[in-house]
Amino acid sequence: MSGVIGSANQNQNQNQNQNQNQNQNQNQNQNQNQNQNQNQSTGDDSASGGVPAELRPIGVSPAVTKQADEDWFRGNKWPPLDRGPVVWPNLPLLKKSSKPFPGSPWTAQYYAIAVLAEFAQQAGWDKFSPQLAAILEKADVASELAELVALVDYRGGLLTEALWQVNGIDTFFRGILFFNAASHPATYGLLSIALRVGEFQVMHYKAHFNRPRPSSLSPNLMPPIEVPGHASFPSGHSTQSHLMALCLAQVMPKEVSQATNPATQQPDPTLSALQRMAERISRNREVLGMHYPSDSAAGKELAALSMPLLLNCPTMKTLIKIAKAEW
């Protein structure tokens, strides 16, 4: 009997040790996950000597429109080719930069809050409902949902890219021509301003229109990420990314803010690298099932309507002058 009890005690001890080891392993995994999360949020990467641990994955994003006589959306890598072989030229091929590196870093979010306060004082920021309502009225919900269901097949080619764009769209704009908070602090500040003002604007109009998300109406979408807890129209990612593109076009070289239509050989800024990136980010949200195409169109319109008011803000005027000198 004592032998049986001893064996039971040994088994209990072994089980306790196993449980402790499992708990230790779980704690280690939790610590590793916490460290990974901290690295992602702070940009710290000890393995690379303090270089920000940011990724900029590029997948295959479906074009916004189908080609004539085709019933599928052509896929775009980078640069996109669905509208012809648009050539984005290189900047002058310097062997030595005339700009000091790095520049003086500053806390961009504080500038963004200051400019938001100035933006809210501009007359008319809350008067864009008629223009956005016109887009919503033209929307065919059934057709849009059918398109979103067709786009589900494209998720595999862009899921990693789209996931990084959930909270990191600025990273992709900073990949068109390299810059960061240290090298181009004022330009980086413009991105923060566009994010903050875009968020402010889009939440105001989301509350006004209160459109349900596509996955609230269709069981066929199965979004691969959690759907944000606010209304669908207009798209926040579209508003913010297009506002970013417009802000950066004020200061960055013409090689990325301008383009020529290959078919007409006429200037067409909608084909610029900045505008195509904004379009791509917006489209990827549709592929995830987060937004209707009309949400994206409304976000682009809201950014265009908001930009003149933003340019009228005193801090914005000063910052643009400084940012131009960074390039």
Image: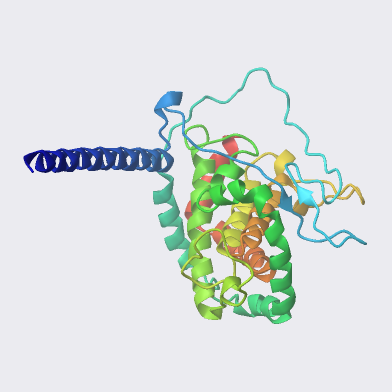
State the residue in front, 145 or 282. 145
Residue 318 visible, this angle = no
- Nearer to me, 67 or 203: 67
> Does 62 appear above or below 50?
below
| Rendered residue at 45%/53% (across/down) | 112
Residue 197: image x %, image y %? 50, 60
Query: Is residue 243 left or right of 294 when viewed as pictured?
Result: left
Count numbered badges in the picture.
0
Q: Residue furthest left?
A: 2
Residue 147: x and y in percent read 73, 68
| Quadrant in the picture for the N terminus | top left
The residue shown at (46%, 69%) is 229
Rendered-image quadrant of the C terminus: top right
Relative to 180, does residue 158 appear above or below in the rendering?
Answer: below
In the rendered view, would you say 288 is above or below 253? below
Residue 72 in the image, given as x and y percentages of width and height = 82, 59
Q: Viewed as shown, does residue 68 lie left or right of 74?
A: right
| Scheme by which the image is coloured | rainbow
In the picture, residue 273 is in which quadrant?
Answer: top right
Residue lying furthest front: 1
Query: Where residue 172 appears, x then y in whole percent?
Result: 60, 44
Q: Is residue 81 left or right of residue 52?
A: right
Foreground pick, 311 / 196: 196
Using the rendered view, name the quadrant where residue 214 is placed. Answer: bottom right
**Residue 36 visible within the image:** yes
Compare residues 311 and 46 and report the one nearer the observer.
Answer: 46
